[in-house]
Image (spheres, helix red, strand yellow):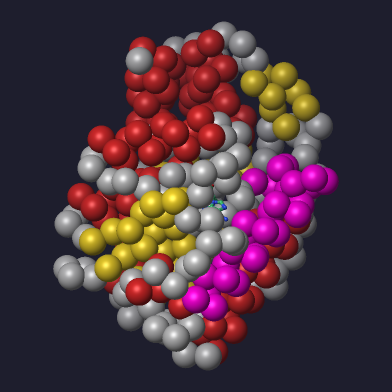
């Protein structure tokens, strides 16, 4: 996308920071945006900002809920990854914040973009499907089981409204993303840190939960393809690995890659934490020419290398 101005929101986050690095590395004109105090882990955000800064990228401070968003709407492409992720954190006191960062922020950003109509990509989530006994297709009925999933379904609705009004806006449903700089609340991050520190990490539920774990580099690739291609407005695409893996299997792989098991302590399953999310991948293959290429061992090895490096620093 030479000469194209790209805005990435949530740039100090896990996936957003990878996306910004990929775009900047390919020579794009990127405006990286995030808000101080809005990442659930400010330590993680600071690490991500430092990585971006070493690559010559400064994150511009902008709270999508309170600040003027007109400058962002000057872009040709808006990749909207900012939000408050996580099913567990969305219950109780987290619910209002989840709505604020996922729905109010998306609504304000779409409103700001309504006049110039840049190409717009929303980072939504597999959680909108609820339980899946078979691969979820994009046209399946949505059955959100948590405030987080509900907020993403609502953000998608806002995108569809904007698309109906002429904005070239699309939705990507990311499935359980992992890799270097994964958020500290996510399972692989906790398991790897637990093994390295020898102190147990919580294992929510019975460990039989299955996920289409998807490597962050593959997610970035799909997102850039979605930004480049002239997809019909309102297109929804699953961005997930076609194969599911249980948490127990992932724990085994982490243990054997590290040469030491990850100690865990059992915890009750979080409400809304479904037994299986499973990506149907036909549409992404057809419209983006994309499939997740990174196998679990390869992706985990890269995430483990990052954790080891952090311990050393
Ligand atoms: N990580 C996953 O497995 C996964 C799966 C499905 C969907 N998603 C979605 O992808 C996106 C990125 O996820 P992530 O794991 O990188 O999360 P993250 O928490 O690491 O990054 C999100 C970023 O958004 C920023 N943000 C929140 N509210 C903001 C506001 N009002 N204004 C400006 N910035 C704000 C935060 O500061 C944070 O840095 C999120 O929308 C998430 O819901 C992630």
Task: Residue 87: give x, y in percent of width and height.
Answer: 69, 47
Task: Residue 144: give x, y in percent of width and height.
Answer: 73, 61
Q: Is residue 276 left or right of residue 250?
A: right
Q: Is residue 160 left or right of residue 233?
A: right
How many marks do you count on the picture? 0
Q: Quadrant of residue 224?
A: bottom left
> Which residue is at a point 27% across and 51% down the rendered structure image?
22
Residue 313 appears in the picture as rendered: yes
Task: Residue 43: give x, y in percent of width and height.
Answer: 51, 30
What residue span does the magenta drawing correspond to? 86-112
Magenta span contains residue 37: no
Q: Is residue 97 left or right of residue 72?
A: right
Q: Quadrant of residue 32?
A: bottom left
Magenta span contains residue 104: yes
Q: Is residue 70 left or right of residue 148?
A: left
Task: Say which quadrant the C terminus sits in.
Answer: top left
Task: Residue 256: give x, y in percent of width and height.
Answer: 46, 19
């Amino acid at each position: 996308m030479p000469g194209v101005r790209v805005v990435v929101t949530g740039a100090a986050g896990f996936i957003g920071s990878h996306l910004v690095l990929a775009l900047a590395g390919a020579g794009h004109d990127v405006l990286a945006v995030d808000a101080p105090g809005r990442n659930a882990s400010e330590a993680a955000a600071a690490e991500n900002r430092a990585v971006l800064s070493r690559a010559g990228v400064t994150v511009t401070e902008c709270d999508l809920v309170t600040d003027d968003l007109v400058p962002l709407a000057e872009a040709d492409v808006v990749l909207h990854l900012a939000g408050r992720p996580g099913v567990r954190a969305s219950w109780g006191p987290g619910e209002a914040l989840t709505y604020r960062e996922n729905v109010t922020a998306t609504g304000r950003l779409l409103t700001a973009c309504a006049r110039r109509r840049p190409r717009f990509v929303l980072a939504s989530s597999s959680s909108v499907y609820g339980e899946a006994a078979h691969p979820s297709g994009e046209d399946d009925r949505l059955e959100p089981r948590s405030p987080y999933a509900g907020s993403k379904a609502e953000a998608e609705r806002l995108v569809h409204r904007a698309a109906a009004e002429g904005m070239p806006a699309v939705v990507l449903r990311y499935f359980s993303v992992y890799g270097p700089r994964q958020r500290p609340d996510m399972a692989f991050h906790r398991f790897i840190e637990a093994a390295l520190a020898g102190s147990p990490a919580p294992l929510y539920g019975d460990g039989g939960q299955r996920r289409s774990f998807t490597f962050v580099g593959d997610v970035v690739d799909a997102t850039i393809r979605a930004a480049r291609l002239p997809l019909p407005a309102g297109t929804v695409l699953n961005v997930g690995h076609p194969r599911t893996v249980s948490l127990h299997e992932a724990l085994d792989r982490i243990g054997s890659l590290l040469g030491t098991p990850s100690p865990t302590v059992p915890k009750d399953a979080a409400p809304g934490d479904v037994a299986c999310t499973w990506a149907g991948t036909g549409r992404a293959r057809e419209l983006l020419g994309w499939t997740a290429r990174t196998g679990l061992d390869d992706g985990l090895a890269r995430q483990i290398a990052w954790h080891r490096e952090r311990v050393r620093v």
